[in-house]
Amino acid sequence: MPLLSIPLFAALFVWRAAQLAFPAGVPWIYAVLSVLLFVVYGVDKSAARNGRWRVSERNLLVVGLLGGWPGAVIAQQVFRHKTRKRSFQGWFWATVVVNAAVVLVLVRA
């Protein structure tokens, strides 16, 4: 079910982009931050398994809020990481909603 958030957001993004001229860099920001966050989730999962230094949840949430959340959604499913911690999931989905609202409502060319 969480993976459905990505195509839904993409459809809303395209719809909104047809109404407004988004800056060309916006999709690239999502792509770069998503790949980055996917990798960071993988590194953090490995660190959790091996008792090494961990990435703070705050940092994961901030990068997701800035636009990396699609990569985080995929990483959570692929790595089975941060999916059971309810407090994190609550904050995570709150950042997704805030990010989507900002992009779909407030971004102007």
Image (tube, rainbow, N blue to C red):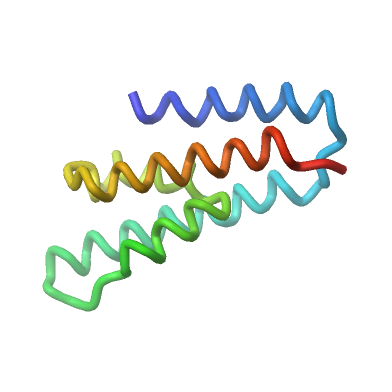
Q: Position of residue 35 (x, y in %)?
A: 50, 53
Residue 22 % position (x, y): 81, 40
Image coordinates of residue 93 in percent, x first then y, are: 39, 40
Which residue is at 57% across, 50% downward? 67
Image quadrant of residue 57?
Answer: bottom left
Vertical relation: 14 (above or below) 51: above
Residue in the foreground of this view, choosing between 90 and 33: 90
Determine the image quadrant of residue 27.
top right
Residue at image point 50% right, 37% down: 97
What residue lies at 23% left-to-right and 59% top-to-bottom?
45
Which is nearer the eye, 78 or 19? 19
Left or right: 48 with respect to 20? left
The residue closer to the viewer here, 59 or 45, is 59
Q: Eyeballing the image, is 49 above or below 14?
A: below
Position of the N terminus by quadrant: top left
Q: Position of residue 79 (x, y in %)?
A: 26, 48
Tell whether 101 sits left or right of 18.
left
